[in-house]
Amino acid sequence: MRVISIVGARPNFIKLAPVSKALRKRCDEVIIHTGQHYDYEMDKLFFDELQIPVPAYHLEVGSGSHGRQTGEMLIGIERALLREEPDAVLVFGDTNTTLAGALAATKVRVKVGHVEAGLRSFNRAMPEEINRVLTDHCSDLLFCPTETAVGNLKSEGIRAGVFLTGDVAVDALIAHSEIAETSSQVLDNLALTPRAYCLATVHRPNNTDVEHHLRDIIEAFGEIGNVVFPCHPRTEHFLHQYGLWERAEHNALITKPAGYFDMIVLEKNARLILTDSGGVQKEAYILKVPCITLRDETEWVETVEDGWNVLVGSDREKIIGAVNSSSRPHAQRPVFGRGNASVRIAELLGENVSSRI
């Protein structure tokens, strides 16, 4: 059986790593990299650290509007699928790469498996939400990380091909946490004391593209103090555009985007995490670090239900208040699985996809 895995951005790479390892024990895997992330910290560093095989195709799409980016991906992915004639395509998460891969495969009548299916924030203003919904409705095999995700699909009339597998992010953390702890020097390099700093990430358009939202967040960092801020290239661009870069440097310790190992160590040792990233919210929960989400909704509702995550949006006073009242809950459930999601996905592909050979 030949499976093509399609990735292009940091969240895709993290999900791919354990799945690729499981797949290659059972079948022939070909990786297509769209090039949605294209600098070292956002791309090659992750392949190196996670020991992901070199992609057979690199489309080098780069940045651009959502329509242009997705369209260029469609052209390149379709060309590769017609050449490779796979039995199935795997897409991951909710990026433009995810949607482009699902659409291209559907058009050439190749079965689509969606890793991390069924997530919903119920905010259609988010491009990621549109990507999730459309990808799920294109997919033949839907690999859900949680019971909530299964329920979301059922409410949309999707019942066939739905499987509760657990979350591959758990697999990735189990596989790499110890290596990260021994190989990363990020705490020493930044002179950080465990549990004495807050870790922040900001990259969502609703926070970066709206000047007063980004300003409020940066001002909140100054009130909180001891904020470590790995800065996404998108965020850096808007901080300069709005004249907020010097203020941000004053209010937080700004670093380059962190590699996966450094990010694990930064998350694990933080007093708390402030983020608008879905993946970081989930990793905070798994690592048992309180999280404050700079959004008004989340697709990871279990983190909020269990008290490990608080939604505050971009409101300065809400951010500061949540930090001041933050605590570390005791109760936690294995809502994201126990670390065998990747093996289960590989097994399900073998059971549900007929080889053309």
Image (cartoon, rainbow, N blue to C red):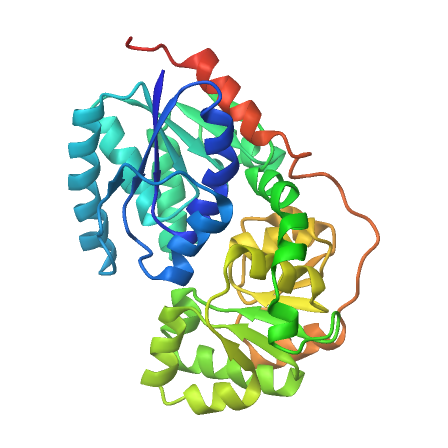
The quadrant of the rendering that contains the N terminus is top left
Name the residue located 54 percent from the left edge and 30 percent from the top edge. 342
Name the residue located 17 percent from the left edge and 26 percent from the top edge. 83
Q: Quadrant of residue 125?
A: bottom left
- Up the image or down, 43 lies above or below 234; here it is above
Q: Residue furthest front?
A: 183
Nearer-the-camera pick, 258 or 156: 258
Q: How many marks?
A: 0
Q: Mark yes or no: residue 108 visible.
A: yes
* Residue 13 placement (x, y as % from top left): 44, 46
Nearer-the-camera pick, 157 or 72: 72
* Residue 98 placement (x, y as % from top left): 35, 42
- Up the image or down, 279 lies above or below 251; here it is above
Name the residue located 37 percent from the left edge and 70 percent from the top edge. 233
Q: Mark yes or no: residue 160 visible.
A: no
The quadrant of the rendering that contains the C terminus is top left
Name the residue located 46 percent from the left edge and 32 percent from the top edge. 20
* Residue 311 placement (x, y as % from top left): 61, 63
* Residue 298 placement (x, y as % from top left): 55, 54
Q: Quadrant of residue 139?
A: top left
Left or right: where does residue 249 sit relative to residue 101? right
Left or right: where does residue 131 sit relative to residue 180? left
Q: Residue furthest right?
A: 330
